[in-house]
Amino acid sequence: MILVLTSDGDDHADRVVKPLTAAGADVVVFDPASYPTAATLEISHSGDGSTGRVLDAGGRRLVLDDLAALWYRRPLSPAAHPRVAARAYVEEECRIMAESLWDSLGCLTVPASRPVIDRAGRKPYQLEQARRLGFELPATLVTTDPESFLDFYDRHEGRVITKPVHGNQPEAGGERFGRFAAPVSTADVAHADALRFCPVIVQAYVPKRVELRVTVVGQEVFAAEIHSQVSNHTRYDWRHYDPGATPIRAHELPEEISVRCTALVERLGLTYGAIDLILTPDGRYVFLEINPNGQFLWIEDATGLPIGAAIGDLLMSGVR
C-alpha cells in the first residue's frame, strides 16, 4: 500500500495517483487536516517489543506497519474541532502525534521525513552542501551585521539581491509571511540598521542567459530552462511567473551537472528535489537553492517532461 499525505484538491497528487490506481495499485490519499475530527491515528507498543500503527479514515482501517511507500506531498496540519476551547494546545498535540507516526514508519518516503525536509529547506545549509559537491555559488553573505551588509553592497557595486534564510515563516497570530528574491534598493541601504533584528541572505547578482529548474526524482533528472530575462516581472525571480511571457523548454544538462544534482539530493537525505540554477551568458551553471518539495506540474505541462510518471515509478519501487 502507498499512502499519500496532502491537502484536498491537490492536482499534483492527482496527476500521480490516478495512473497508479488505474494500474491496480493500492493508494490511499489522506489529508491530515481531517485528524482528529474525522480520522483516528493510533500508535501502540506491546510488552513483547512489537508495535502497531493505525490510520482509521474514510471507513477504512489501515495498518501502516507494512506500508510500502509514503509520499509526504503537501499535507496540512491537524485541525481541532470547532467546539474545542484550547485549540492551539490540541492542534499542537495532534500535529506532534501525526508527525511522530509518519516519521516512525521506516518505509520509502518521498521526498523524506518531515525533519529531513525541514533541514534540507534551510538555505545556508543547502549552500554549504552544494559547495562541497563542487557547485559554483554566487558570492554570498548571511548576516545580521549592518556593516558587513554595507561592505558587501559596496564591494559588488550595488548589484546584489536579498532572499530569506528559509522562506515562509509563521508570524504572530498564525499568519504566514514570505518574500521572494529582490534587488537591494537605496531604501534598503538607508535602513540597513534593521538587519540586526533578523538574518538575511545577500548575494551578488549573477547575469542570466536562462534560469533552470532541475527536478530530481530518485536517480532521474528532468531539467527545464525558464527564459526569465524576456520579462521584467521575472528578471530577478522567476516565481513572479507570467505564463504568457515566460517561455519554458526542456534543457539538456551536461553530465557533470546532472550527476551533481542527484548527488545533492542524496546528500540532503531526499528522494526528490527541485533545484534552481542559473545558466550564465558565458555558459556557467550556478547553484541558487533547492526546494525539497517543489511543485512540478507547471514544468511538466510546459515541457512534456514525465515528472509525475517518474514519481509514480519511485513510489511503486517500494511495493516491488
Image (cartoon, rainbow, N blue to C red):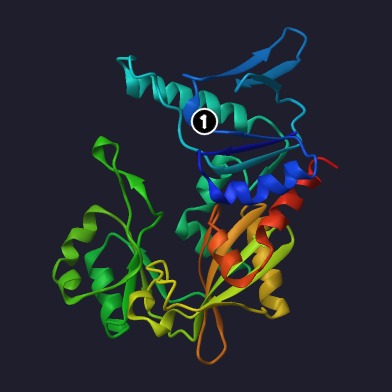
- Residue furthest to the bottom: 282
Q: Position of residue 276 (x, y in %)?
A: 52, 69
Residue 201 vs 107, above or below: the answer is below
Can residue 133 be seen by looking at this rendering? yes
Badge 1: residue crowd in 10 Å (few <14, some 14–19, many ≥20): many
Q: Position of residue 314 (x, y in %)?
A: 74, 51
Which quadrant would the C terminus be assigned to in this image?
top right
Give the quarter of the image for residue 194: bottom left
Residue corresponding to mark 1: 32
Instruction: Answer left or right for 131 relative to 21.
Output: left
**Secondary structure category for the residue under label 1:** helix
- Nearer the observer, 243 or 86: 243
Instruction: Answer left or right for 157 relative to 65.
Output: left
Residue 80 vs 256, above or below: the answer is above
Give the quarter of the image for residue 86: top left
Q: Position of residue 238 (x, y in %)?
A: 42, 71
Give the quarter of the image for residue 92: top left
- Residue furthest to the right: 320
Residue 152 vs 173, above or below: the answer is below
Which quadrant would the N terminus be assigned to in this image?
top right
Q: Residue at x 35, y 67 (%)?
A: 181
Q: Residue at x 79, y 45 (%)?
A: 23
Kind of residue indicated by mark 1: Pro
Q: Position of residue 198 (x, y in %)?
A: 27, 54
Instruction: Answer left or right for 219 relative to 288.
Output: right
Q: Residue at x 53, y 92 (%)?
A: 282
Can residue 204 be seen by looking at this rendering? no
- Residue furthest to the top: 47
- Nearer the observer, 72 or 121: 72
